[in-house]
Amino acid sequence: MRVRIALTVNDEAREALVPVHKTLLEVLREDLGLTGTKHGCELGECGTCTVLVDGEPVLSSPSAGTAPPAFS
Ligand code: FES
């Protein structure tokens, strides 16, 4: 199943049709081509995948028991 999402990234409106299981990290890197967001542990421990959502730092890969903010 895919969902269409709309988000603003770096002050630019973007849309993507993405599988529901994708993380925000995967959408940013694979669907929007924004490879500045990096993979790390993907366990919520290192902070490498941190992005700002409404000015607040959040992890863009899943961490224990949390959903990425774009899909929650
Ligand atoms: S990749 Fe380590 S916390 Fe996200």
Image (cartoon, rainbow, N blue to C red):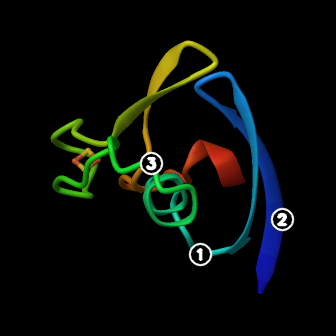
Question: Residue 14: horizontal and vertical position, in percent?
Answer: 74, 45
Question: Residue 52: horizontal and vertical position, in percent?
Answer: 49, 24
Q: Give the labeled residue for mark 2.
A: 4
Label whose residue precedes the other's in the sequence (2 or 1):
2
Give the camera-side residue of 37 and 71: 37
> In this view of the protein, can residue 9 be seen by the observer?
yes
**Residue occupying image coordinates x 77% and y 87%:** 1
Secondary structure under the numbered disc 3 in the rendered image: loop
Label whose residue precedes the other's in the sequence (3 or 1):
1
Give the camera-side residue of 6 and 43: 6
Nearer to us: label 2 or label 3: 3
Give the camera-side residue of 36 and 24: 36
Q: Amino acid at mark 3?
A: Leu
Question: From what the image shows, is residue 55 above or below residue 31?
Answer: above
**Residue occupying image coordinates x 35% and y 50%:** 35
Q: Which mark is residue 32?
A: none
Q: Amino acid at mark 1?
A: His
Q: Which mark is residue 21?
A: 1
Label whose residue precedes the other's in the sequence (2 or 3):
2
Q: Are marks 3 and 1 in contact (CB under 8 Å)?
A: no
Q: Give the labeled residue for mark 3.
A: 34
